[in-house]
Image: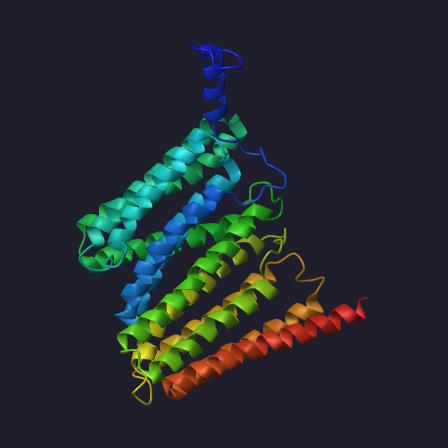
Amino acid sequence: MSNQPGGAPLSWASAAAFRRHFWQPPRAHGDVIQGREVSFLELFYDLVYVVVISQAAHHLSGDVTWAGVGRFAIVFGLIWLAWVNGATYHDLHGRSDGRTRSNVFLQMAVLGLLAVFTGEATAGDGPAFAAVYSAYLFLLACLWYTVRRQDDRELRSRATPYIVGVVVSAALVGASALLPDTARLAVWAVVVVGWLGSIVILDWRNGATRDTSINVSASLIERFDLFTIIVLGEVVVGVVNGIADAGRTPSAIVTGILGLGIGFAYWWSYFDFVAASRVRSDRGAVARWLVGHLAVTMTIAATGGIMVSMVEHVPRSPTAAPAAMLLSVSVAVGALALVLVATSLANWQSKAPVYRPVAAALVTAAAVALLLGWLAPPPWLHILLLMLTLGAVWIFGSLTWFSYARRVR
């Protein structure tokens, strides 16, 4: 090959060495990168989910009913499972080489297509959504299989059930494209519940040894925190869309800005009480951490979708049913989910004087939220009271924390 000016000749050997460096096999099980931080590639990948979740929340904003929330929960559950599987694969086996980048970009392309059909996934675009989602799961199964091929015999036996589960899920979702809308949704619900049940059962069985449980590294914890920020953005989107749809009236603007306060209150509570914290090693902790995060992110995204209806109904008093109760239920479930996440943290026992009172305050806030939903005050007042309730929990938690910190000095 030709020489570079002032440098060593470019040979076929150097090109082959570069190819080996830039196109490496995935990291094997146990090949942990100590101190690994979330990469720019992972942040880019997560941005695709901003679009996917936004489409799902946008559909909910036009179907604020109990049935609509149920359909949203099923679709969001599928989206969350796709993200968890993709994020976990990269955390355990990804590199910064060309193979990993190409695989991530391929996943992003499939997810971009999935976003096109997410808005009407429970209606006319259901078959297309099922087909694309199935293709994405098959892609993930192939990636996990490449890891299995290089594992030793013992690790292969552990990885096989997981890969089979991904393939079966892909086949079920793909086959649901041939079913009517109601039956298709039922199949999707079975897939979501099946995954959650498997997580709970496997974590309980393996929790005593923790060797075969899901690895919750510091970088994966950071990914979950970042995903929470993604869904918090849906509250902002819901407020903006609600104000725009309501004709930008002063009352709509005031109500929308108050609605942002609920998103802000979520942020304070999540990132000050449960974010960036290690997970306990005892059985059931990882399952509680995962299921709790599903509930937290789902309810935040639902709050964003419902917020559109709340702002649009500003001229009416009380709020048009069932938007008021649905908003309160979302906030209440989100508060209870924070408690579930908190119980899974490594410092739940050591800092019980802080976590237990805060958990009790969150449970109280959930009860207050449900009471407000039943009373259904005018939208601006309803949103303001929810914001103040969540804010009061944060203030109580902060005072409790500072009191505890002073006692242990």
Closer-to-camera residue (337/34): 34
What quarter of the picture does the N terminus occupy? Answer: top left
Q: Which residue is drawn at 65% across and 71% down?
A: 356
Q: Residue furthest right?
A: 409
Image-based side of 371 in relation to 189, left or right: right
Q: Is residue 336 visible?
A: yes
Q: Which residue is drawn at 53% across and 12% down?
A: 8
The answer to whether residue 17 is above or below residue 374 is above
Q: Residue 4, percent across and down?
A: 47, 15
What quarter of the picture does the C terminus occupy? Answer: bottom right
Image-based side of 282 in relation to 340, left or right: right
Closer-to-camera residue (335/241): 241
Q: Residue 129, percent across and down?
A: 25, 50
Image-based side of 379 in relation to 368, left or right: left
Q: Residue at x 58, y 55 (%)?
A: 285
Quadrant assignment, res 315: bottom left
The answer to whether residue 398 is above or below residue 292 is below
Q: Residue 157, percent across and down?
A: 48, 32
Question: How is this picture coloured?
Answer: rainbow
